Image (cartoon, rainbow, N blue to C red):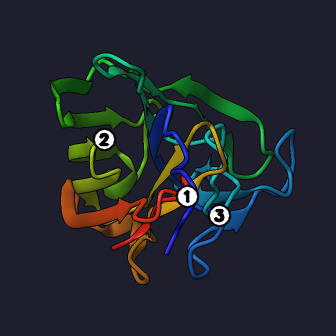
Amino acid sequence: MRTSSPVAVRSIAIWLNVFVPFDINGAVVTVPAGPHAGKTAVDLGSALLLTDQRAFSTDPRATSRMQSYAKIDLGEGEPIVSVTHRSDWAVVCDRERGEVVCRSRAGTRRMVARIVSTDPVVISLDCATSAPCPGAPPSLDEFEYRGTITYRPGARELSLDLMVALCPATEGYGAVNDGPGIILFRQAPLPTAAWQAPRGARRRIHTVLADRDGGGFLAGV
C-alpha cells in the first residue's frame, strides 16, 4: 500500500495512429532503386507504395497514415481538452526505376473530434481519411477509427472504447504529465491476405487503465 502523497496528475495525453508496418508476413517488397532504394513497399503492380518503415512505436512523432492526439490539462478548474489530427506523406514509386510518381498527404477534413463532457472528460472520435495516391488496395484506400476516450479525474482512470480497421495496423498510447508513452493497445493487421481485408472499422478495442496507488502510472485493470 502506498503511504506517500499521490503524484499530482497535471495532464493526460492520448494518441492513436494508423500505420502501414514495414513488414507484414512477407506481403511487402523492397524498392530496387531510386531515392527510396532499400525501403519496403506494397506492390501495386506497376508501382510501389511505401510502408511507414516502422513497427509499433510509442513515439508520438512516428510516421502514420493518420493520427489523433488528445491532451487533457488538469488544473484547479475545469479540464482543458484539445485534439489535433495529422496525416503524413504517402509515397508511390515506379516499380522498376524507383522514381517517385506520387507524393501527397491525405486530407484531415473527415477526422472529427467532439468534446462530449469535461466531468468526466469524454472525447468522441469519428475519423477517416482516404489514400491520396491512386492504386491502393482496398484495405489501404480508406483508413478509419471511431469511438470514445474517457478520463475520470477523481478515479484517475482512462478508458478507450473504439472500433478500428482490420488492416493496416492501429495503435494507441497514453502519457501522464508528459512522461513516456504507455501502451493502451496495439493491433496488427490480419495475418493473411492483409491488403485484401474489408474496409471499415470492424474490430473493437476496449481498454481501461487506472492509477490506483497514486504513483502517476496508468496500469491495466
Asked if residue 194 lies left or right of residue 181, the reply is: left
Whether residue 45 is visible: no
Picture quadrant of residue 101: top right
**What amino acid does circle 1 point to?**
Gly
Location of residue 46 in the rendering, given as x and y in whole percent from the top left corner:
58, 51
Q: Which residue is mark 2?
A: 153
> What residue do we see at 61% from left, 41% from top?
60
Q: Residues within 10 Å of mark 2 (few under 14, many from 20)?
A: some
Task: Write the residue at 51% across / 51% down.
Answer: 6
**Mark 3 highlights which residue?**
55
Contact between labelled residues 1 and 2, with CB atoms less than 8 Å apart? no
**Which badge, 2 or 3, is on the more N-terminal residue?**
3
Evaluate whether residue 3 shows in this view: yes
Neighbours of disc 3 within 10 Å: few (<14), some (14-19), many (20+) = some
**103, above or below 43, in the image:** above
Front residue of 12/44: it is 12
Amino acid type, mark 2 = Pro
Tag 3's secondary structure?
loop
Real-space Cα distance between discs 2 and 1?
A: 14 Å
Q: Quadrant of residue 62?
A: top right
In the rendered image, residue 51, in percent from the top left (x then y), is placed at 62, 53
Residue 207 point in image, percent of width and height: 30, 65
For this orientation, the residue located farthest to the front is 3
Q: Secondary structure at mark 1?
A: loop
Q: Is residue 78 above or below residue 53?
A: above
Tell me how far mark 3 sits from mark 1, CA to CA. Answer: 30 Å
Kind of residue at badge 3 = Ala
Tag 1: Cα neighbours inside 10 Å, few (<14), some, or many (≥20)?
some
Circle number at residue 215:
1
Q: Nearer the viewer, mark 3 or mark 1?
A: 1
Dot 3 or dot 1: first in sequence order is 3
